[in-house]
């Protein structure tokens, strides 16, 4: 009977070998997939059980974890919640994280590969794994200036440092307090969330980079202008047709200039003047002449149609798909199907400000390990070259003229040349128009490029224009940079 | 003529004492770390637990020195270490339960049952002076075993808990009769098979090159098959059913060496399972849960794969090195301290810890099989290998189920899981294995002067079961001097009686 017992012991050995292989698969091979399974509640406990790293702006922690005496161990705290919520997002027991909490999760919770050394050290010292720090590029002075200038109006604003692409401010109002979603009381968090969802002002939407996007109105003329100047056939003083009323071919509709006013002589105007008072007919006309393909190409060179991570996910802006001249004419004045994010319009101004070189925008300056050593630092990267330096210079000159003599007057800053462009965009429904302003300053040495949109005219409602409502906010933001 | 002095291996009692100290340290260290991990301080009742574990160890050690001095020295330390690990995890889950406003106390009960189990083991070692005594009443053991196995179906005392009817309640004491039934049926199988192995081995018709047993010998196999199917279908207990059938097939194979029995057995069982899957929703559901565990629909369904997958999440969260005692969230899985204690340990001790636990089981089981090879009587061989195999198979079914290697069925993890009947039964099994290993490792009677006796020994050797089969064991020719050697399997020195 010994032979079968020996064989039986081999069978036992094989059974245990199978168990060991399977245990290895579950605990090692498939561990990541299991840990990341969407209904794995343990991941929340695991995240909360860790000392999650802070999110830092100018040396101050705007989000950090505080030890508490409950099942989770740590409570996420947002010091200036609503001001930075569009950037930080929230870290919730109940819902998936959002914003920077989600985008930089690996660094914040300490599982990023760059933090491997620190993890191994922790293993031997027996301490608790701590998360890394994420330092943002945001300048709190600019962020606060924008928020203050916005007041209770709905909208969004973005400020970029043109030479690098650093995002100096990213505002979306109204905002929300992430602290109410970071609580550990599931019922309370659910109630707070439902309240935010039900709020007609939709505070959870990040209007600066996501949201439903906006028609850009006349700020889109910067893209028309770039296309026109890049052709080499036109200069600021070129005289172009500028009728008071432009019939849209194939339709009974017409395009007017703002307020139905006469542009220039009533039939012709210079490009300089057309931009200065934001005439519609010359740009619509020229767009039809250049064609949809040229316009699309120019828009794409500025970043339209491209998804972007900063590392928050930015919805790509779109030109729409104009099928005929009438639609193309509407597109050229920022209507029809054109939809943009405020970040996209800030990128347009930043490219012009930076001699035609568009730098890739970014929000994270450095990542640091728990020991505060820098593990990663963002270097500026070129995104595209939408216009030549000559075109950029010409456009700067024309945009300065807009602020000095035209619709951009409310953005003037004493002693500094400001380059800007207004926009007032029809919303396509009964609501009041959106007010836009995009600009950069100082014109000869640009330190900041901004774009501002105020939804439905803001405080001025039907009386609003980009000039009256959006330009003052842009000015406040530019002053915050230049004044430093 | 030069005499060769037999190098007799030491009985190993000294090694056992050292290993026991390590085993107690594993359990007590685990408890201390649980206290530190969960509450930041050494648990107040640690001395009680330490005293019981150490006391049990010392008592067993002394009893072995007294009544079974040659017993295997590794078994008791492994069992003490596993029991200690189980206690620490149950204690840790008690703390978690109390923190959530639920009742604790499972660890205290487990400690009490550890005492009862060790006492039962000591009683077996003291009273059972020879394992062959168990052979005396095969049909009583078999009948009692079957009755116990099916007793949860009886009115009044039978109880249905969590959908499976595998509990009885006698005078307020609740237990799983399958656990003691395991012992009784193994004894019955060993006694029955050792008596009838010749008729079972006899050639029957040959089909497809496979020697089939005679039709008449199918009888007992069919009875056991029927009992297993009843357990499967009526008691809704796939695990116990599989365990008993596997035990029976394994012992049948050891006694007959006929692979045909295994194939027939597996075939029969497969037929039963396929019938059950197609006829009974609960068995089909087990398979569905196994195959589609990570499908959200299955996961969130009532009686779906939630428990299984939460256990897998726990194991994955543990990773290579585990979260550490008291640092994980094993309490998120239902039955974390019984059926799912492997997942709980895997989460907090990691892959490394689980590997160590599996290796401890493997060593314990292989030690049991080694004792079966070494013991000189057929009954002992069958009983020892049956007991060793039943521990192995039980581990395979429950650990395989929790890790999704095979469909999940509820069984206890020997020595680790919370549960009195399991703990006591497994301690008794280990006690019998210790008794068998003592018989296997005891020195053979001293050989006298060489001469006629040498020939007698050689002739005896020829008569032994294994040597009697042609071409299997090394032939011993008369006149060759046979040096008495330490008892082992290669050179049987006594006739193996059937």
Image (tube, helix red, strand yellow):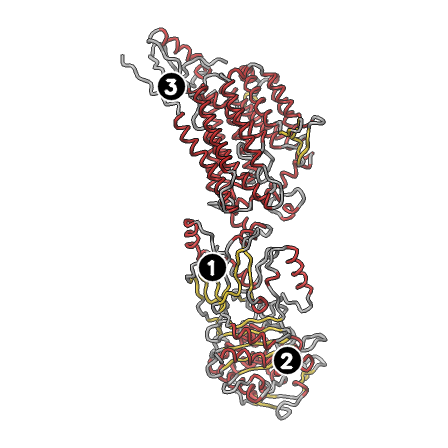
Name the quadrant containing residue B408. top right
Name the quadrant containing residue A213. bottom right
**Residue B255, position in %: x, y?**
52, 20
Which residue bears the numbered disc 3?
B486
Res B361 seen here: no
Residue A424 badge:
2
Q: Is residue A21 above or below residue B132?
A: below
SS state under label 1: loop
Work out whether mark 1 precedes mark 2 in sequence or the reverse, and give the earlier one: 1
Q: Chain of mark 1?
A: A
**Whole-number angstrom distance, CA of label 1 to CA of label 3:** 64 Å
**Residue A481, position in %: x, y?**
50, 78
Judging depth in this view, the residue of B227 and B139 nearest the camera is B139
**Residue A175, position in %: x, y?**
61, 68
Q: Chain of mark 3?
A: B
Residue A132 badge:
1
Judging depth in this view, the residue of B43 and B344 nearest the camera is B43
Q: Is residue A25 above or below residue B430?
A: below
* Apparent side of residue B64 relative to residue A216 in the rendered image (left or right): left
- Of tags 1 and 3, the one toward the viewer is 1
- For image coordinates 56% across by 67% down, the residue present is A80
As drawn, which residue projects farthest toward the top? B452
């Amino acid at each position: 009977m010994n032979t079968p017992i020996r064989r039986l012991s081999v069978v036992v050995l094989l059974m245990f070998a199978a168990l060991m292989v399977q245990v290895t698969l579950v605990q090692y091979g498939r561990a990541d997939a299991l840990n990341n399974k969407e209904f794995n509640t343990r991941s929340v406990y695991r995240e909360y059980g860790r000392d999650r790293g802070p999110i830092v702006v100018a040396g101050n922690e705007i989000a950090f974890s505080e030890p508490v005496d409950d099942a989770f161990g740590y409570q996420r705290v947002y010091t200036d919640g609503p001001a930075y919520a569009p950037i930080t997002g929230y870290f919730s027991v109940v819902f998936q994280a959002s914003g920077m909490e989600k985008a930089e999760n690996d660094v914040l919770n300490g599982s990023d590969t760059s933090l491997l050394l620190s993890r191994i050290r922790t293993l031997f010292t027996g301490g608790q794994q701590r998360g890394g720090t994420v330092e943002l590029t945001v300048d709190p002075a600019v962020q606060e200036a924008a928020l203050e200038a916005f007041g209770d109006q709905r909208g969004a604003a973005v400020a970029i440092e043109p030479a690098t692409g650093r995002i100096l401010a990213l505002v979306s109002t109204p905002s929300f307090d992430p602290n109410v979603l970071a609580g550990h009381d599931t019922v309370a968090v659910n109630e707070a969330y439902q309240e935010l969802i039900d709020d007609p002002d939709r505070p959870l939407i990040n209007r600066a980079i996501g949201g439903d996007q906006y028609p850009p109105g006349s700020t889109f003329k910067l893209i028309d202008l770039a296309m026109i100047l890049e052709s080499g056939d036109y200069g600021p003083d070129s005289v172009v047709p500028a009728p008071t009323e432009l019939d849209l071919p194939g339709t009974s509709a017409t395009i007017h200039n703002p307020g139905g006013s006469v542009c220039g002589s009533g039939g012709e105007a210079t490009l300089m003047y057309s931009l200065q008072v934001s005439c519609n007919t010359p740009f619509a006309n020229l767009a039809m002449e250049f064609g949809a393909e040229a316009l699309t190409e120019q828009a794409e060179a500025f970043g339209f149609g491209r998804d972007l991570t900063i590392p928050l996910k930015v919805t790509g802006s779109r030109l729409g798909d104009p099928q005929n001249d009438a639609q193309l004419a509407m597109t050229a004045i920022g209507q029809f199907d054109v939809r943009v994010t405020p970040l996209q319009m800030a990128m347009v101004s930043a490219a012009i400000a930076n001699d035609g070189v568009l730098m890739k925008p970014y929000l994270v300056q450095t990542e640091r390990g728990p020991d505060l050593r820098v593990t990663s630092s963002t270097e500026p990267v070129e995104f595209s070259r939408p216009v030549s330096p000559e075109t950029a210079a010409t456009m700067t000159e024309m945009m300065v003229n807009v602020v000095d003599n035209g619709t951009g007057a409310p953005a003037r800053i004493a002693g500094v040349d400001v380059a800007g462009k207004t926009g007032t965009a029809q919303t396509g429904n009964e609501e009041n128009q959106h007010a836009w302003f995009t600009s950069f300053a100082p014109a000869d040495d640009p330190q900041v490029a901004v774009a501002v949109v105020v939804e439905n005219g803001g405080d001025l409602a039907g009386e609003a224009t980009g000039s009256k409502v959006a330009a003052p906010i842009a000015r406040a933001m530019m002053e915050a940079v230049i004044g430093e | 003529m030069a005499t060769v002095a037999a190098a007799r291996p030491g009985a190993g009692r000294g090694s056992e004492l050292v290993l026991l100290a390590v085993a107690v340290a594993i359990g007590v260290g685990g408890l201390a770390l649980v206290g530190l991990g969960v509450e930041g301080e050494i648990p107040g009742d640690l001395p009680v637990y330490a005293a019981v574990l150490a006391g049990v160890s010392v008592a067993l050690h002394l009893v072995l020195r007294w009544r079974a001095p040659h017993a295997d020295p590794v078994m008791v330390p492994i069992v003490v270490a596993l029991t200690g690990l189980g206690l620490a995890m149950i204690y840790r889950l008690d703390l978690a339960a109390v923190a959530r406003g639920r009742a604790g106390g499972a660890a205290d009960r487990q400690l009490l049952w550890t005492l009862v189990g060790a006492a039962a083991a000591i009683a077996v070692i003291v009273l059972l002076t020879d394992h062959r005594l168990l052979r005396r009443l095969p049909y009583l053991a078999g009948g009692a075993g079957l009755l116990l196995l099916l007793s949860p179906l009886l009115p009044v005392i039978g109880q249905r808990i969590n959908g499976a009817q595998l509990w009885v309640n006698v005078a307020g004491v609740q237990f799983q009769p399958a656990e003691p039934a395991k012992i009784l049926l193994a004894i019955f199988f060993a006694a029955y098979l050792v008596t009838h192995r010749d008729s079972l081995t006899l050639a029957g018709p040959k089909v497809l090159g496979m020697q089939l047993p005679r039709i008449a010998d199918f009888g007992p196999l069919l009875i056991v098959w029927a009992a297993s199917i009843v357990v499967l279908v009526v008691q809704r207990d796939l695990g116990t059913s599989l365990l008993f059938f596997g035990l029976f097939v394994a012992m049948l194979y050891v006694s007959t060496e006929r692979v045909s029995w295994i194939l027939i057995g597996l075939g029969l069982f497969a037929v039963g399972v396929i019938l059950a899957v197609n006829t009974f929703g609960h068995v089909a559901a087990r398979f569905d849960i196994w195959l589609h565990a990570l499908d959200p629909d299955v996961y969130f369904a009532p009686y779906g794969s939630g428990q299984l997958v939460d256990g897998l999440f726990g194991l994955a969260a543990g990773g290579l090195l585990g979260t550490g005692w008291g640092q994980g969230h094993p309490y998120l899985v239902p039955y974390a301290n019984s059926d799912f204690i492997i997942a709980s340990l895997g989460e907090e001790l990691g892959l490394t810890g689980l590997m160590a636990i599996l290796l401890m089981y493997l060593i314990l089981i292989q030690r049991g099989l080694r004792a079966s090879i070494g013991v000189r009587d057929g009954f002992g061989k069958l009983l020892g290998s049956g007991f060793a195999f039943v521990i192995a198979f039980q581990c395979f079914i429950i650990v395989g189920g929790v890790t999704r290697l095979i469909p999940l069925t509820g069984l206890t993890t020997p020595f680790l899981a919370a549960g009195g009947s399991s703990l006591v039964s497994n301690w008794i099994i280990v006690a019998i294995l210790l008794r068998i290993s003592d018989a296997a490792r005891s020195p053979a009677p001293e050989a006298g002067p060489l001469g006629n006796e040498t020939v007698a020994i050689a002739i005896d050797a020829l008569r032994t079961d294994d040597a009697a089969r042609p071409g299997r064991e090394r032939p011993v020719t008369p006149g060759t001097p046979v040096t008495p050697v330490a008892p082992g399997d290669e050179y049987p020195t006594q006739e193996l009686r059937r």
